[in-house]
Image: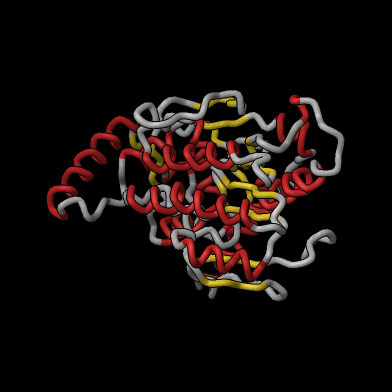
Amino acid sequence: MLAPDVIEVTVFDVNTLKNRISGVEYINGSITSKNDVELAFLTAEPTTVFHTVSPDPFSKSNQLFQAVNVDGTKIVLSCAQNCESTKALIYTSSSSVIHDNWSDLIQATEQAPVIFMPTQPEFYSHTKAIAETLVLKANRDRIRTAAIRPAGLFGEGDTMTVTSVISNAREGKGRLQIGNGSNLFDWTYVENNAYAQLLTARALIHSYSAPSLAESARVDGEAFNITNDEPWRFWTFTRALAATAGYPTPDKHLIVVPWRLMMGLAWVLEWGFWIFTFGKQEPRLTRARVKYTTMERTLDITKAKERLGYRPQVGMQEGIIRSAKWFLESHP
């Protein structure tokens, strides 16, 4: 069901056969093709563009990250600026753009500097930072722009966190815990992320007719942290997700492995795969994945609350229930 102020929705993607919704128009194409994107704009004539395209962050294809996150974003921006009907563009960035992916991130705000290579060790995060910078710099160059930085997205249709966690538990691999499990982590249920996107879009459109706001109240040209505002311990969340799907792991059955030991094992596996596959494949266990599961990563969403009026609409527990239900229905 569309929101009252949404007249028409068009989805543009390389594969639009999955997750189809009645009443929505679909266009097949690649963000890396200027012809495809131009045709999509000509066909849809959008007022608002929600740029959500991005590869799997754990992929090791730097070429793909560059092509989609940077070059693709340049194409979308150019087309949006040249489309007479387009007024606003909201970019789905990442909380990782202010994170070095190694040290803990504790109640970080949007005032933290955006990090690029070589300080940023992850090329994915580097390209997301470039894309966000391009989008925000384009603000008021014929269109109004903003960026949303969700943390730990999960929910229905999630083929990464939800599918990975429950599939592992189903295979009997849910007993492993890396580290002491005390690290807090912010998550964002997909519906809350969508709600934040709509709030941002409305604010950008409203900014055309509203009086100029003070710098401390502006939405256009700004980035916003978005979370469920309800940090969970990382491993508590994964076990709750698995248990809700019917694969519980009692505490007494946990296998706790020190994170330094797992980092060493991951290093050996990465080098082994690199040597024997000539860098074409990587193991499921990598140092990046180990670190991701053991670091503290929480964000302050005060700015989104004050400027967007954002409040999570779906709590963590309900989001977990919905996610598990979706997984069981789609993975019988």
Judge whether 319 appears above or below 101 on screen.
below
Nearer to us in this view, 329 or 62: 62
Would residue 70 be seen by someone viewing this image from the given angle?
Answer: yes
**Residue drawn at point x = 40 percent, y = 41 percent:** 177
**Residue drawn at point x = 48 percent, y = 42 percent:** 128
Judge whether 304 appears above or below 49 on screen.
above
Residue 100 placed where, x, y %?
42, 29
Would residue 227 be seen by someone viewing this image from the given angle?
Answer: no
Looking at the image, which residue sits at the far left? 276
Residue 184 placed where, x, y %?
54, 32
**Residue drawn at point x = 60 percent, y = 60 percent:** 156
Q: Tell me, what colour scheme is on the image?
A: secondary structure
Residue 165 placed where, x, y %?
46, 53
**Residue drawn at point x = 34 percent, y = 36 percent:** 257
Rendering quarter of residue 82: bottom right
Judge whether 26 appears above or below 296 on screen.
below
Residue 86 placed where, x, y %?
69, 55
Q: Quadrant of the N terminus?
A: bottom right
Nearer to us in this view, 262 or 119: 119
